[in-house]
Amino acid sequence: MPTKTPAKKEDATKKETAKSVAKTERYFYAVGRRKTAVAKIKLYPSKEEKSTLSVNDKMADKYFPIERLWEIAAAPLGLMGDSKFRVVVKVSGSGVSAQAEAVRLGIARALVISDETFKKTFKDMGYLTRDPREVERKKPGLKKARKSPQWAKR
């Protein structure tokens, strides 16, 4: 039977200490939604050079492979100026496009909780408005929500 190497034990202890630090660290919490996507945002104040964004334990540029989606998700962080944060996101449901928009809404809400002066800027950009559009349900006798079967005369 293979035994655990010391490197794996060190990695495990690093993860445990990181989790314990994260539990005691103060953060701002918000939720963003779009279609069926739900993004739970934890915003930690940071002393690093720039803000960081991780989504489902991956860096945002790895989670959102298309640059446009990554830019949508990180847009509120780019608008806020010199404030630095470490953003941790747990997102689920829907597709990556809706998830990126849910992350954007959640980050904007969390930033407003942290500093009320961001509210007007985010409101003007439309980052604090939840997009209410959802998929319409399929009706009986139809092929899709509104598409009917082809009409045949005979």
Image: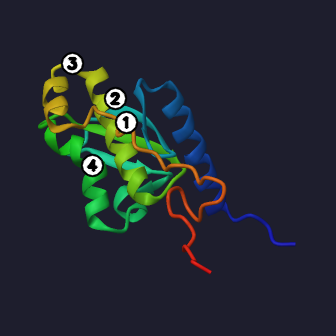
Residue matched to label 3: 116
Q: Amino acid at mark 3?
A: Glu
Residue 130 percent across, percent down from the top left = 35, 35
Residue beneath label 2, please?
A: 110
Label placed on residue 74? 4
- Residue 4 appears in which quarter of the rendering? bottom right
Q: Amino acid at mark 4?
A: Ala
Q: Residue furthest top?
A: 116
Of the numbered discs in the image, which one, if any, rests on residue 106?
Answer: 1
The total number of labels drawn is: 4
Tell me the quarter of the picture where residue 68 sits: bottom left
Q: Secondary structure at mark 3?
A: loop
At 54% across and 64% down in the image, what residue appears? Answer: 148
Question: Where residue 151 sits in the image (x, y, percent)?
Answer: 55, 73
- Does the residue at mark 4 contact the one at mark 3 (Cβ under 8 Å)? no
Please give the name of the residue rendered at 21% of the width and 18% of the height, measured from the top-left corner. Answer: 116
Q: Going from the N terminus, do you reach mark 1 or mark 3 first?
A: 1
Residue type at tag 1: Gly
Element class at badge 1 = helix
